[in-house]
Image (cartoon, coloured by chain):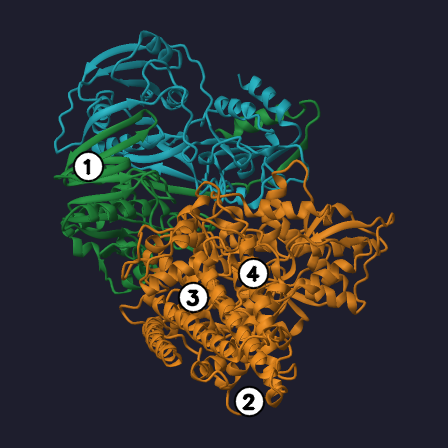
Amino acid sequence: MSENIVVLVGANAEVLDASTAELLTLAGQLGRPVAVVAGEATEALVAELGRHGAAEVHLVSCPQLSDSLVLAKAALLADRAVDAHAKVILVASGLEGNEVAGLVAAKLSAGLITDAVTARFEAAELVADKVVWAGKYTVTAKVLTEMAVLTVKPNSCVPVIAEVEAEVRQARFDFEPGAPAARVVSAEPTAATKRPKLVEANVVVSGGRGTDGDFAPVEALADALGGAVGGSRAAVDAGYVPQTLQVGQTGKSVSPDLYVALGISGAIQHIAGMRTARRILAVNSDPEAPIHRLADLSVVGDLKTIVPAVVARLG
Amino acid sequence: MRIIALVKYVPDSGDEVGFEPDLSLGRVGPSSRLSELDEYAVEQALRLRTELAGATLTVLSVGPAEAESALRKALQMGADDAVLVTDEAIAGSDVFGTATVLSAAIRSLEGGLVVAGMSSTDAGLGVVPALLADSLSWPLLSQAAAVSVEAGLAKIARVDETGSRVVEAALPAVVSVTDQSGEPRYPSFKDVLAAKKKSVATLTLADLGVDASAAGAGSARVEVLAVSRNADRAAGRVIVDVDGSSVDEIIDFLAAATK
Amino acid sequence: MKVLLFVIAVAVSIAAVALFVRGALTLYRLIGAGQSSPGRLGPVGKRLGNMVTEILSHRRFRARPLVKAAHWVVMVSFILLVPTLAIAYAQVLDPYAELPVIGGWPVWQWLLEIFSVGGLVAIVVLFTVRLRHPSDPEDASAARDWRSRFFGSTRWQGYFVEAVIAAVLVCVLVMHVLTSAVLARYPETAEAGSWVHYPLTSWVGQLFWSLPPVALETGIVVAATLKILVSMVWLGVVGYATTMSVAWHRFLGVLNVYARRETDGTPALGAAAPMYVDGKAFDIRDLDDLDEDATFGVGKIEEFGWKSLLDFASCTECGRCQDLCPAWNTGKPLSPKLFTLALRDQAAGMEHSLDIFAALKSAGAAGELAAPVRDADLVGGVISPDVLWSCTTCGACVDQCPVDIEHVDHIIDLRRHEVMVKSEFPEEFNGLFGNLETKGNPWGLPPRDRMDWAKGLDFDVPVLGTDVTSADEVDHVLWVGCAGAYDEKGKKTTRAVAELLHLAGVKFAVLGQAETCCGDSARRAGNEATYQGLATENIETFASYGVEKVVVTCAHCLNSIGREYGQLGADYRVEHHTQVLNRLIRDGRLNVVAPPEDERRQLTYHDPCYLGRHNGEYDAPRELLASLPEAELVEMEHSGSSSMCCGGGGARMWTEESIGTRINSARLDEAEATGASTVATACPFCAIMLGDAAASRDQAPAVTDVAHLVLAGVKRGLPNPTDESETES
């Protein structure tokens, strides 16, 4: 009999987000996916969970959820995991996800692996891989405890559709902190359209003088990739972007997973602010531009035609 | 009140790192240092110390003897004193073991407010502050972009994937701060000299009354099986676009890079 | 009546001298309140000789030959007239009185005549010069009158001092005219009143022969009295106003020249002055000797050494420094003159003159305090922090100053206090300092990448410690430097120099990863501790490989290793690549060949401040350019010792430049104005700064290092010329 694998459904409980779909797919590979929704859920969401393989969906209402930072969510998840006799609990990686996972593991005396990229059972023991040290090493670790808690990096697998009629269970969870707890006194959800902050973004798309002042392609690509917009000093000097968006020695230092340099020559002053990016894509019409020596993929060509074509393909 | 800032000694992000025989990440690299993210914790702790009358700031680290240099840096920034918990039995601890040792140290130091960084730059978990709060039975105010303390009440602004929230809790509490909380100060040379006179106390598990089995590799709930070096970043490819010929390759690259 | 006049003259004189003595004592006390300025009093003989020759030759007067000549004549006439003032008292009583011994000696009288007339002409010239540079800072609040070097100088004081000189000279000449007239009309004394004794005034004297002798005698007495009164009013006013340094420079300027930093007569450029802590030069290796309360740099006025305070008190307000300051000329609040005057007034505890106050205000240079407050923080209180951080340490002010004021050292002393005590500095320095301390280069790039520049060369570059054990085994050690190792343009320059050395058959080696930053930027940012940390690390590296001389491609490395490491007990001979390449060409070891079409192309050369002004090398790069058959050198408006900075010195390379226009852009404007297609330079900082400016324009001259042009020329003569694109930048 396959083990129950509990999946914490992402925070936005109206539509299924990509990382939850991936968690369900991974859970399906490991055992029987049990989706736990903390708080409200629409029927559409429940259907989507089933479509991605959730055998059970626990809809858990919890009045204290919004007042509590992470404790209530962690306690709720632990409660459901116990209820489901879960073998593994999967949570999406992130600031909050890692905290929730840690607290659940503490509560259940379970082993914890954060930021995993793959997971599998080897002789009934959960083994996961994670990538460390700027992508240089892969560490393979095994969970020694009965129960395992994992946080999984986004984009770690391709979600598959596995039509399942999810068994829906309603539950109510009352969170009673055993100790003094923090209280949320006000909350303001992030506006959906807002671009991430430059220094926090996982993707940064920057434009330079090669844009000739037209930042539309830069912004379009940034939005298509969910990234932030930046600019080189030359672009700032020319007034294309405000100084607050300058990337470089005398501007902001960024180290996103992906950095896209459009029409940026790659002067050392710029490179000093973005060289720690994990992957770099450059488009510049000048084959001699130093940026081509740094980028993982360099395209010598006209960004004004290439970028719109790429944006169109990204949909 | 004693504020305790937690700091970690880590290899510099530019260093080549090694792995210990137990496959844990080596902490002593050619330019190991105070974790950059923990500098933000020290900075916020310093600001809070200035605001809170009678407060003192102790920096606390768990690690090898070399970790004293990370504590020294924090002392230069202005911390009053430093404590290093170092014990062979700690080596190989997972986050739970680390939290156990830290909470014992914080209790023995009678800390009233703990300030930690958002995560370490080497392991990057971001879990320890939560486990610590759990272990101490203190409220957790994590991932703060701003912190203030007034009349025994700590208040933070937390900005994350879901939006921004203001969260508060009565002291004692565990706070973790992000790299958006305010640039760490550059210690003046006067401060550097003054720090030479400050002491770094060393404690062992026995000093803290922690059983050696509660920490270290033996207590870990996870065992590292293997470490493999990934292929070095391939030298960049340069392609010349002719009428959009590069678009396919760009799409593939973007798909791989955003994984 | 004579007696009455005499009594008045003496009474006024006593009061004036008393005021003057009081002023002089005040200044002595103020200047003496400074910290020690080690080594500024001796060796006496050398300093005296220097002082006399410098003042008599006026050799520190740069350009402006008319002003220089006029000032020299006025100075000499002032010296000559002092004894005549003494005899004027006697002349009030006896119009025929003359100086004992030399009074009737024609040589003396000719000198007096020539310099009195000459002095009068000269002072009119100087007065006219001042008038032709109108400056009214109060009017200019909306649009600062940048052009005038007198902007912010206290106008009434300048005019007053010049008017006094003119009035005294007029009195002297009137006395001469009347004396020659009263003497020449009597046969017994005709010779004494003739052109033999009064060569220039006796002709005018003839006009007064008709007047009765009593009238002439009375005229002499009145003129003598006026001469005394005018002189004494001057003395009294000057004594009262101790900040009237346009007048005090006659005395203090002389002392300042005596106590100048360099006893070889060169300006206080090159090395920055050591940081003195309790009178001892700071050395990071002797930290244990430091006093617990030691302070670093200068935060308050009395923390300056006395020589610095003497500097401030000596300023003539001539504004030559301001005239060439790249910060001032691009709309920043720093004028070396206003900076000096603000500190002078703070030292004296006197309010600024209206002109200075208005100028400081309109330039955004004023501190928060409207009037001097004892123990005020200089940065923030007396001057705005923007003044301090606008300086590129280019040294134009120091080079220009005729009384040897050491502006750059003062700026660095203030920066040291801001950084090392207060930890207040432009936020970009956070990254700079961290990068220097943890990575040993300003960009924070990995030390292991230091040899990337050598990849792809068709010969091996030996590295000391791995391929070569000691520097004795090679002709040259090439110091690559941070820009030479990391910046794309800098790397190409390093490659070009390496290729040229290789082609010339020179054996050379490099230090590879053992190099760390020379520390120039840290030192000029005021971070002496970080500078010395880097410098001592390099000194140890040099020692371990027996390195005693190096070749550099960066003017900043040239200066710090060659000029500054000496302060830490090292002694290296450092050559700039343009010097070495120039020698190789002269010796025929490198041959430059013209391009096939041999079209002359116009080049202009930008003098790096730390190669030119700070280290006196203007010729080697120009000779190299002259050796290129196709090149025609055209100079910019500012070149050589009056060259304008690229904007990257003084650690300004690492900060934003948000006030006024960009210096690099202004400098590129000058280069463009020559019509040259290429701007050659000889420092990677200049190449980066000017290259940045060029990159932001649609059309701009190419910016390149001299070495690339030489390499292109040399490669043309090789049997199998390699791809030329490699040598372009």
Residue B166: mark: none
Circle 1 or circle 3, nearest the eye = 3
* CB within 8 Å, label 1 to label 2: no
Colour representing chain B? green
Chain in cyan (letter): A
Percent position (x, y) of residue C212? 53, 77
Depth check: C316 or C593 in front? C316
**Residue at image point 49% right, 86% down:** C97
Depth check: C520 or B194 in front? C520
Pointer 3 local density, CA inside 10 Å: few below 14, some 14–19, many at least 20: many
**Residue at image point 20% right, 27% down:** A184
What is the distance, in whole Å, between disc 1 and disc 3 at their CAs? 71 Å
Circle 2 or circle 4, nearest the eye = 2
Pointer 4 local density, CA inside 10 Å: few below 14, some 14–19, many at least 20: many
Q: For this view, does C22 lie left or right of residue B104?
A: right
Q: Mark 3 points at which residue?
A: C245
Vertical comparison of A29 with C568: above or below:
above
What is the distance, in whole Å, between disc 1 and disc 4 at their CAs? 55 Å
Q: Name the residue under label 4.
A: C556
User: Can residue C443 be seen from the camera position used here?
Assistant: no
- Label 2 vs 4, first from the N-terminus: 2
Quarter holding residue B136: top left
Amino acid identity at mark 4: His
Residue B134: mark: 1
Amino acid identity at mark 2: Ile
Q: What element carries label 3?
A: helix
Chain letter for mark 1, please.
Answer: B
Vertical comparison of C686 with B226: above or below:
below
Residue C102: mark: 2
